[in-house]
């Protein structure tokens, strides 16, 4: 497999799949978080520094195969320019009509193509409403699939080399992530620095022999995390549970949970996880106390109770001080830590204490030599909210892709280059 570190882009035109699916201000349409743009910079700068040129392609939002001005990548041009000072960037308003711009492209210059998802062929699905009759939908899908090869060939024709640096879409079998790679020889297709970093970080968590190894699983539902928990159990020493899924475990063990979130149809699943953890000698830490609310509201009244004795009419929205102390101790004594999912409703300041404490404990563990990987939108948001992104080992840019990779699933965008 070709490595970007060893490749010389001098005189080459590289088409790079980046992930510029960034949040925009609803009124000004300005980029409100440039994390993903900054994540692509090392790859772009390597190409330009070598004396090559870069053709950047991405999606933005869900235009569903139709041109929709509010999802135009032109809105990120100023932020991209800001992050590539002195670099000439040309914007092409139709990703299928870039021939002239590509022909005129000089070393050191960049082209940004318009949103790939303005074409049905990118995702391989027709731009039809969900209520479309099955026979019509089936015919439309076949038509889109028949048009995909030409779409892919056109994108590939722009460049000498293909670089995939969009980890956030690597789990999708889309034209620009999985199909286009086949148009380039093994010597002329590769991952960018971002994907390489993602894979290295996840493999460290999965394969490192360093101990203790801890997985922190938060969020609302046990069902969302069952596959990754099952994959990790044979390799970890500690499993920390937090967030809404706490109460499925508590109720499964006979506790009183008041109005707390609970997947009542997953009680047996929770007990099975605890059984398997015991079989693998994994220490499971479930919150023992919580901050409760009388309603799901930022200004709700609060009290603190044991998680298995939640008062009637109240719901647990954050972990309590006793739990924070225990979780902090476990994290700080770990050598490898994966964090996916918040400890509570951290969007509300009243219920952000537990998530913030975990974020700070991860930063302290990192400073003490631990490898810490943070993944999943809410966990990343919590790390960024506390300005600790540079205090942990790695912050993943791909929530769904990270989960699927760590669950052991084959990601189409990764397979297309690794095979």
Image (cartoon, rainbow, N blue to C red):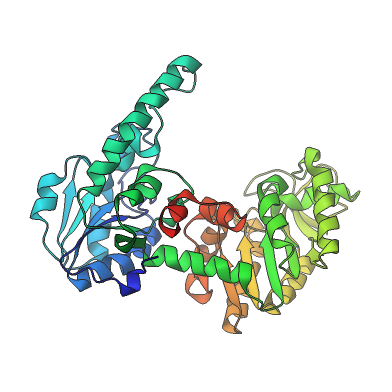
How many labels were placed on the picture?
A: 0
Q: Quadrant of residue 27?
A: top left
Q: Is residue 347 visible?
A: no
Q: Is residue 264 visible?
A: yes
Q: Residue furthest right?
A: 254
Picture layout, residue 291 above or below residue 8: above
Name the residue nearer the viewer: 42 or 71: 42
Q: Say left or right for 259 vs 63.
A: right
Name the residue nearer the viewer: 311 or 380: 380
Where does the image place residue 187, in percent across and percent down from the top left? 31, 63
Where does the image place residue 145, in percent across and percent down from the top left? 37, 31
Where does the image place residue 129, in percent across and percent down from the top left? 44, 22
Picture layout, residue 6 above or below residue 70: below
Picture layout, residue 178 above or below residue 122: below
Where does the image place residue 292, in percent across and percent down from the top left? 76, 52
Q: Measuring 68% from the left and 51% from the top, which residue is drawn there? A: 227
Q: Say left or right for 414 vs 86.
A: right
């Amino acid at each position: 497999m070709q490595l970007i570190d060893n490749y010389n882009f001098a005189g080459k035109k590289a088409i790079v799949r980046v992930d510029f699916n960034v949040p925009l201000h609803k009124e000004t349409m300005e980029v409100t978080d440039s994390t993903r743009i900054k994540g692509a910079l090392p790859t772009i700068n390597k190409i330009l520094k070598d004396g090559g040129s870069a053709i950047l392609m991405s999606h933005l939002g869900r235009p569903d195969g139709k041109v929709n001005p509010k999802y135009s990548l032109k809105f990120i041009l100023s932020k991209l320019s800001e992050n590539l000072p002195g670099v000439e960037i040309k914007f092409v308003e139709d990703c299928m009509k870039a021939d002239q711009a590509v022909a005129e492209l000089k070393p050191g210059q960049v082209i940004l193509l318009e949103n790939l998802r303005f074409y049905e062929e990118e995702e391989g699905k027709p731009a039809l409403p969900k209520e479309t009759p099955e026979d019509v939908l089936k015919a439309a899908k076949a038509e889109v699939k028949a048009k995909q090869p030409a779409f892919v060939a056109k994108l590939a024709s722009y460049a000498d080399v293909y670089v995939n640096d969009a980890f956030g879409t690597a789990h999708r079998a889309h034209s620009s992530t999985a199909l286009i790679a086949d148009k380039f020889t093994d010597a002329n297709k590769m991952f960018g620095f971002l994907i390489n970093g993602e894979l290295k970080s996840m493999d460290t968590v999965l394969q490192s022999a360093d101990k203790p190894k801890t997985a922190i699983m938060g969020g609302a539902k046990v069902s969302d995390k069952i596959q990754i928990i099952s994959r990790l159990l044979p390799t970890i020493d500690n499993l920390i549970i937090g967030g809404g899924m706490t109460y499925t475990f508590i109720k499964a063990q006979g506790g009183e949970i008041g109005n707390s979130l609970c997947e009542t149809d997953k009680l047996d699943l929770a007990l099975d996880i605890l059984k398997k953890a015991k079989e693998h000698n994994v220490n499971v830490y479930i919150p023992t106390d919580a901050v409760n609310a009388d309603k799901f509201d930022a200004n709700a009244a609060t009290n603190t109770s044991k998680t298995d004795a939640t008062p009637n009419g109240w719901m647990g929205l954050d972990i309590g001080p006793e739990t924070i102390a225990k979780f902090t101790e476990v994290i700080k004594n770990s050598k490898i830590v994966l964090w996916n999912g918040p400890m509570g409703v951290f969007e509300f300041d009243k219920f952000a204490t537990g998530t913030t404490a975990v974020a700070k404990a991860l930063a302290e563990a990192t400073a003490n030599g631990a490898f810490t990987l943070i993944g999943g939108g809410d966990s990343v948001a919590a790390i960024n909210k506390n300005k600790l992104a540079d205090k942990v080992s790695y912050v993943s840019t791909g929530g769904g892709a990270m989960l699927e990779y760590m669950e052991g699933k084959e990601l189409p965008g990764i397979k297309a280059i690794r095979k």
